[in-house]
Amino acid sequence: MPSRQLRRHATRKRGDSKENPVERRRNTQPLLYGFSVLILVVIVVTFVGLPAVRNPSGGGRIEFGSYRGEPIEYFPGNYLAERVDALAEQLREETRADASEAELEMQGYRVWRTAFEQTVLHTAVLYEAERGGLWVSDDRVDDTLIRIGPYVVGGRFSEERYRNTSNTQRYAIRKLFREQLIHEQYVRDFLQNPLQSPAEIEFFRQMMDEQRRFTFVSFPFDDYPPEQVRAFGEENRELFRRIKLSRILIKAGEREAAEVRNKLAERSSSFEELARAQSNDLYAEKGGDMGWRYYYDLKGDFDTTEPVDTIFSLDEGGLSPVLESRFGWVIYRADSPALTLDLNDPESATTVREYIMRYEKGMVEDHAIAQADGFRRRVEDVGFTGATLEETYNVSLTDYFPLNYQEIYFLAPVRSMTQNLDLSSASYSEPFFRTAFALDIGETSQPVLLDDQVVVLRLDDVRQPPQRQLDLLEDYYNFYSGQALEADFQNILLDPQYLQDNFNETFYQYIFTSR
């Protein structure tokens, strides 16, 4: 079966393709972060050297997005502020006194992002609770404040602290505690003591009732032949030309970009000064320095290749005209002449291979499937063991595992007994399980496409699960069903169509800011 057809049937692991924005930011610009104007001394300062929050245009609130039109915002004393405090306190002891700025930024990002996500869920719960008429009495709020509220000193309610708290603060505290009590009650009503179907429990037991062990041969994508990588590079040399560039990105309009270009031509200001003052991208703080860029990198910034050709025709020190990109109007400076691809350079060969794996992965899949098909045909002639002895193949044995789709049962995962062969992606592949559990003992499968390899399986043995696993099945089902219910609960509430997520932009504008 062609690889693209196989891919349509493959189920991918979630979340593999998204790059962490902190990592992306760190890779593109190693900034030094400084202190900004305070609106409140929040718990973030417990991280040594971490900057505090910058005042957004004199207001007292920072808005990170919205849920069903309700702002997800930070201001002193609200739910998001309380979550930031609590999470920062949890992480404080994990943060070393000599932590680098990169580590501090990552910790800070984790605190604020997690607090944001928890606040979105909180907002969603309050919306649903109000829609359902859920409320908590004043007596319950009073009792909670007396027992564990901010007026408690030494384990006892302090009337003096209560009297010294302003009416505005009292109202805010009471509102926060009421919302938290409503949230807790809603979640408790939804998740506590869920009904369980005996038929569903039996279905789960039957999934785990038969365990299988296989010998398999792996055809990893990393084994894509160097000669084919070289051939692709030779045929597509233009894609791998590279040039060292600086740029200024202007989003206001073409006229404003032309004014900047004129200043550069007149040399009234340096490129670096104008980049820092005028550019609207991540390279501004580095004076516009983008480093080395490949032709294929820049192709994605424009609707046609003509602007890219213009950039690559620049001499060292040359300025491009104002060019319209997908992000705004740009001016480039060539900081080196364009270099052609040298496939004798190991770094260049690695670049071509990485490009193929990212943009032309179908070629790699087709090659691996063809290799696996050839092996499968030899099995028909000389048997599985005979075929494995004819060449140097990646052969391994699996541990016993049941029909453990999506690895819901951690006691019996799909795993290879050989450390250098990873089968973890098989757990998320429906075609893998359909193929593996349709085999008879001694039968060899057709090739199965996984995330980063193609495998051919031979069923070696079938057994019942060990008694210790059977003894844990019902308890484990209760645990798993509770986890699944909680995930469904969040997925239902956090429908993306209701969420406006501006967290990353706001975080880097107001929380982590440059000097």
Image (cartoon, rainbow, N blue to C red):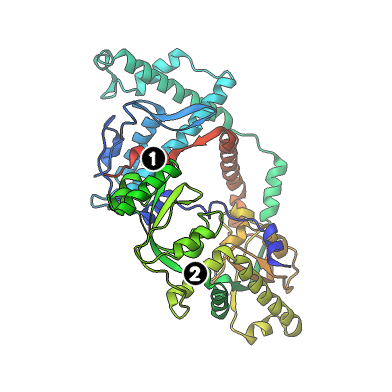
- Kindly tell me whether residue 287 is visible in this rendering: no
Q: Amino acid at mark 2?
A: Phe
Residue assigned mark 2 = 240
Quarter of the figure that contains the C terminus? top left
Is residue 301 placed above or below 441 in the rendered structure? Answer: above
Q: Quadrant of residue 155?
A: top left
Q: Position of residue 511 (x, y in %)?
A: 34, 39
Which is nearer the eye, 357 or 110?
357
Is residue 217 placed above or below 99 in the rendered structure? Answer: below
User: Residue drawn 35% across and 18% down?
Assistant: 146
Q: Amino acid at mark 1?
A: Phe
Which is nearer the eye, 455 or 495?
495
Image disc number at residue 507: 1
Q: Quadrant of residue 278?
A: top left
Q: Position of residue 151 (x, y in %)?
A: 30, 20
Which is nearer the eye, 323 or 191?
323
Please tell me how crowded label 1 is: few (under 14), some (14-19), or many (20+) other residues with Cα within 10 Å: some
Name the side, left or right, on which 87 lies relative to 413.
left
Image disc number at residue 181: none
> Which comes before the other along the chain, label 1 or label 2?
2
Q: Position of residue 135 (x, y in %)?
A: 52, 18
